[in-house]
Amino acid sequence: MHLKNSGRLQETVNSKGGFMNSSANKVAARYRELLQGLEQRSHERINLALECRVSPGSRRSSGTMKLVENISRSGILIRWLPSDGPEDIPRPGDTLNIEMALPANHNFERKCWFCGGTVVRVTKAEDNSPLVAVRINTTKFRKYSPPANHKGSSQLPQFASLNQ
């Protein structure tokens, strides 16, 4: 059934008795297309170049060193290093444990930030190194204890250069 609306828009009655405006549907579809390319994150990201230790969530291990690219309240983007083999790269749905040493504060002793998360996406950086996006599920702070192979010369976490 077709109805005229002021002689300009044509509306069609759908099978459930509601009206469906074809012009409005076209506008909505175009709006969805435009939104797909825009930033849709709900939390601000902070760009970093900070080392972290990553281990699979399913087993207890010392983990391997990776590089945090950026972090937000709900997620973290981690760069896998060229020395990592392809078998080490997690897949979407995998769980990871991530640990980062935080700088000392004059009011508190040095802490380590620990979080557990789920891999949501794996992409490639411009240099072809894997970028692993992780949704943060749990987070806590622990007392800092340097790894066995830690040099102990710095009070700050090790910052790494992206141009190594």
Image: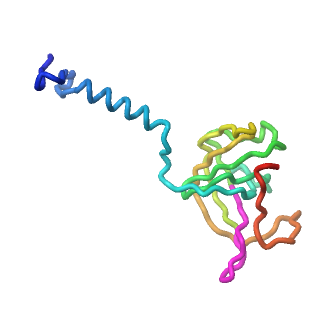
Q: Residue at x 84, y 43 (%)?
A: 83
Image coords of residue 110 (percent x, y): 72, 75
| Main secondary structure along the magenta-highlighted residues | loop
In the visual, does 122 lie left or right of 73? Answer: right
**129, above or below 75, in the image:** above
Image coords of residue 74 (percent x, y): 54, 55
Locate residue 113: give its quadrant: bottom right
Of 109 and 3, which appears nearest the observer? 3
Q: Residue at x 50, y 37 (%)?
A: 37
Of 164 and 116, which appears nearest the observer? 164
In the visual, does 101 lie left or right of 11? Answer: right
Image coords of residue 136 (percent x, y): 58, 54
Q: Residue at x 69, y 54 (%)?
A: 68
What span is colored magenta in the figure?
98-111
Q: Is residue 54 magenta?
A: no
In the visual, does 125 lie left or right of 2? Answer: right
Q: Residue furthest bottom?
A: 107
Of 36 and 122, which appears nearest the observer? 36
In the visual, does 114 lie left or right of 18? Answer: right
User: Can residue 137 be seen here?
Assistant: no
Q: Quadrant of the N terminus?
A: top left
User: Can residue 19 be seen here?
Assistant: yes
**127, above or below 14, in the image:** below
Question: How many marks overall?
Answer: 0
Its colouring scheme is rainbow
Locate residue 102: give its quadrant: bottom right
**140, above or below 53, in the image:** below
